[in-house]
Amino acid sequence: MSGTWKGIHPLAAVDPGTVLGDGVTVGPFAVIGPEVEIGAGTEVGAGAQIYGPTRIGRENRIAPQAAVGFDPQDLTFRGERVTLEIGDRNQIREFSTIHRGTAKGGGVTRVGSDNLFMAYTHVAHDCQVGNRTIFANNATLAGHVEVHDDASISAFSAVHQFCRVGRHAYVGGFSVVVMDALPFAKTVGQKPAFFGINRIGLSRKGMSAETIRRLDRALRLLVRSGLNTAQALEEIRRELPGDPEVDYLVSFVESAKRGLHKSAGRGGRGGKGAAEAEGGDA
């Protein structure tokens, strides 16, 4: 992505106050504004724009025309000091946008490490994105969204403000997430439904067969047993004690504020077929 240049291309515009680590490359026509710190080995592609206050870690790849650290798209924003923090080894591809926080939302948008943001993805103000997540093309987060570690959000899917996407969750293509998406599970559809455990995704991440079995049992109790949520959680605790992944699932459900997408999917347009079109599991 850095082409043949090394260091700062003569056609780039870099504010004198920018702090660049060792080995940072900045392509032609890139713009880096004031109050930006970029860690060692990061590549900033041609035409990318980065504004601050923003702190970016090491070995990130910011593709041409990406827009990072711009003002939040919030009508209450009045120019107050708000920030963006990005970890290490992320790939932020062409025309992706990641905005700073708002004062009312805590003042900071955070992105962890080892994430992939494919072209045209959007992370809005005050979002909190974990590590090793995948955002396919045009995946969009509204403000104040949490995306936990190892989650995948497929192409053209949108997540409503204040929602959460749990660890190892798979959100299928063209989904409209207006409540929390369960961890370890496939959530798919314009009226999203639960389509079982994200078995292939968990296996790819090295989770043991026994842990997957226990999570599958916990999710079935939660969604398909006919028990209400409180009864299902009580049964999960009784039947599957002492498993940290199951404990996280229980904690995630108990802390939900917008509800959970846990109606059982039965196939049809925008349902199971959408999951299969995206490869089923992530």
Image (cartoon, rainbow, N blue to C red):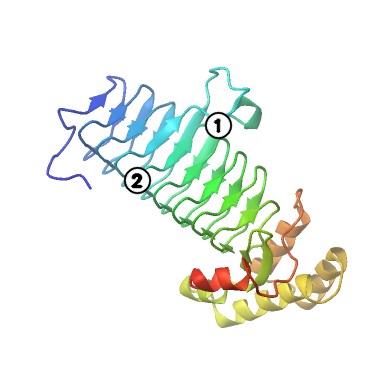
Image coordinates for residue 106, horizontal then vertical, percent: 62, 31
Which residue corresponds to the image point at 67% horizontal and 48% vertical from the top-left?
A: 163
Image coordinates for residue 139, horizontal then vertical, percent: 50, 51
**Eyeballing the image, is 126 above or below 153?**
above
| Dot 2 amino acid type | Glu
Query: Is the residue marked by circle 1 packed among few (<14), some (14-19), or many (20+) residues within 10 Å?
Result: many
For the question of whether residue 63 can be seen, the reply is yes
Between 26 and 112, the one lying in front of the other is 26
**Tag 1 residue:** 101
Query: Is the residue marked by circle 2 packed among few (<14), some (14-19), or many (20+) residues within 10 Å?
Result: many
State which quadrant residue 220 falls in. Answer: bottom right
**Tag 2 residue:** 94
For the residues labelled 1 and 2, the Cα–Cα distance comes to 22 Å
256 horizontally vs 274: left or right: right
Which residue corresponds to the image point at 65% horizontal and 67% vertical from the top-left?
A: 244
Query: Which mark is first along the chain, 2 or 1?
Result: 2
Between 274 and 229, the one lying in front of the other is 274
Which residue corresponds to the image point at 55% horizontal and 54% vertical from the top-left?
A: 157
Secondary element at image label 2: loop
